[in-house]
Image: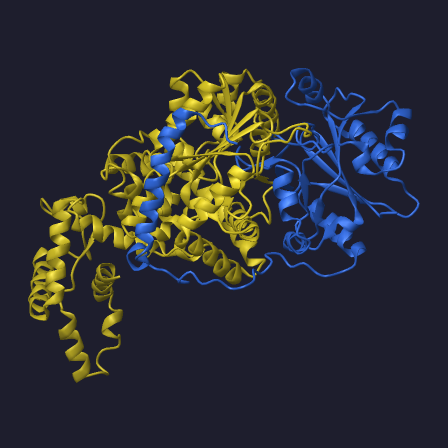
Amino acid sequence: MPINIDAPYKPRIREALADLSVRKAVDRAMGQLAERREKAVDAIDNKSMRNEAREIREQAIRDLPVLLTELETNLIRNGCDVHWARTGGEANRILNTIAQNHGVRTAIKSKSMVTEEIHLNDSLEEIGVKVVETDLGEYIIQLAEEPPSHIVAPVVHKGVKDISELFQEELGMEPTMDPAIMCDTARKELRKHFLVADMGISGCNFAIAETGTLCIITNEGNGRMVSSLPPVYVVVAGIEKVVPRVEDAILLWQAATRNATGQDASVYFSMTSGPKKDDHADGPTEIHVILVDNGRTKVMEKGYADALMCIRCGACMDVCPVYREIGGHAYGRTAYPGPIGSILTPLMNENIDIGKDLPFASSLCGACRDACPVKIDLPRLLLELRNDLSEEKIVDPLQNLLVRSFTQILKHPKCYLVGTKVAGLVSKLSGGASQTFSKLPSPFNRWTKSRVLQKPSPHTFRKIWKESQKNPQASKHSPLETPSTTGAHQSDQDIHQ
Amino acid sequence: MTSRTEATQILSDPARKEILEKLTRNLETPENTFKVPETMGVRSPHLTPVTEGPRTSPENLAILFGRQLDSISGSHRILLENETVTEAILEHIDHLRKDSRDLGFTNNILSWDPRILEIPDLSDTLSQQNIELVVPEDLHSSECRDSAANIRIGLTGVEAAMASTGTVSLSNGPGMNRAASLLPLHHILLIAQDRLYSNVEAWFEALREQNRLEEVLCDRSQLSLVTGPSKSADIGLTLTLGVHGPRTVHAIIYKNT
């Protein structure tokens, strides 16, 4: 059973940490993905690819209004219908109207994060449209009635046995542990839907402004099916997806696939510009493009436009030591888990309570920043966001008070001196041989409930320093190398970083 | 020109205005909009190709392309002077029939219009072997779709083939359907040697130089870059082929006459 993703932050994380089998599966999968990714980016001039990908995305975000208008003009010229939606609700209403106008009964859908974000399936199902997820991973979790846990590998938390049992139960498959047979079963089942669906729905990886072209990346071919077989094709695209030129999309496509799965190129890169012409045998006769804001302008308004450069490759999750321990569901009800999700979720949601704890669910180790193909400085953004949230008094008031008091102490050298002496005294008085506190009285026990606290050194740094200056030979170790002062030094780092 | 309904338009137009206004307002002060801007919106004039593309002879490109396609679970054959494309197709079909774990081969091939494939006597030679090329006219008709859906082998040409990644570009247009490279379990690609490029960037560079971008992208309605057979690793991180698209992709590379 998956964890309760609607539970509050702390119980949710505890539940995630307690699920050892999911933790093992996620860690193994992430390890493999990270390894493949590293091999794929080491094989090329990754520095230049990252620089150029960054330039493309940064320019695109800086020029968004111009590029969006250019995209719209060219899409309409190509024969597409363009709609704009401020919120997920508006996007869903537009989609429902299109579905109702065409009497749609079944819609097939290619994997898309923006449609997860706006809960599009629920909205269509409310008006009686059956929505079938066609990405194998998404299909599995749709059968299991679970949300995805990773943006590239949505079913990463489920083992072969779980999936086999699910297929036996839902699709009447004979018992097997062979993924090839399970895959064939899904192929046959989904093919039926592909052939009769009245509407195809997908997201959009890149929208090329100069030609009015909508690009989607898939490996299974469901993206090509969804955009080719049904008579009506609807593309739901976040407004940040636009890029200026064709060559930009080609570079970003390769950056995304190398970083997402370690492939040189995804199996399919479908570039759709318009509905079929009269003399074409296949392709949709009508294409609707819904350009969705749903919090993106808010991300920009709050000063985090950097995060809109993301190309959704998932590399930041694969390398994140926190994600690898807790998995995607622990990030709560959000389409975007992991480091990038910890920035987007609190900023994009109307209700700030959703995801307000996520920026703190990071060790700020910087692995995500080093991996990101568009060089988003994720730790910096997380830190800025922590600051913003505490200024807006959205985080725990006690935690806020402690951090603020500590900041004041650090700002005044005399206070700091007194503080270190008191801390040293506490350490001495507490006695015992242990280097750590494992249990503190209330309210400080909120810290020691989930982690141990390094005891302050009984000797202050200043004292050790003075002694070492007086008699450098007497002290074999540099003061900074003694275990207790290293601990103190470390906590300073945490605050100042 | 557009057929969008009044209902969505009423919703959409104020949204458009508001979104564009918000973006413009925010971007007027980029110093407040970005935390760590890097490039100030300045870009280098050229993009570097991601994979190296040696400028080499078409023969060498064919070898590179074949090797690359093999490495991603595809297969290929480069024809010698005296071998014909039709014979190579027949041999591959024989191989599929013997080797395949799928029964139920029909004698039909879902195909592009033979006139576009430009292989001399293709239809006639195949029909002597009781194999018919089926060129669908309208896949939105259920009859046409049902018959196409049961065909196990698809045959298409390519717009271009890129050696460094084993990628082919397939566009759709009159006589060039999407279904032949999408619905069947097995896909046979016919690649004339002069359609080989070192990498995908080189092909787009050529298209831009020849002023053909509009034609290839917009006029054809969809361009697909396809790199090997359909695959997934969603179940237990095990590679499985033929999830939705073809399980096998076989390229036959021939010299143009």
Q: Is residue A459 left or right of residue A371?
A: left
| Residue at 21 percent of width and 51 percent of height | A388
Observer able to see residue B176 = yes
- Observer-nearest of A400 and A71: A71
The residue nearer to you, when weighing A383 against A67, is: A67
Residue occupying the point 66% across, 37% down: B229
A21 w.r.t. A478: above or below:
above
Left or right relative to A135: residue B88: right
Which residue is drawn at the image coordinates 43% and 43% (left, top)?
A27
* B92 in relation to A50, above or below: above
Work out whether A144 lies above or below A429: above
Q: Nearer the viewer, residue A239 or A330?
A: A239
Which chain has been coloured yellow in this picture?
A
Quick check: A275 left or right of B161?
Answer: left
The hue of chain B in the figure is blue
Q: Nearer the viewer, residue B123 or B83?
A: B123
Residue A404 vertical position relative to residue A416 in the rendered view, above or below: above
Hey, which quadrant is residue B87 in on the image? Answer: top right
Q: Quadrant of the N terminus of chain A?
A: top left
Residue A214 in the image, given as x and y percentages of width and height: 53, 40
Q: Can residue A314 be seen at all in this image of the molecule?
A: no
- Give x and y (percent) for residue B207: 67, 52
Which residue is found at the position 81% from the left and 54% from the top? B59
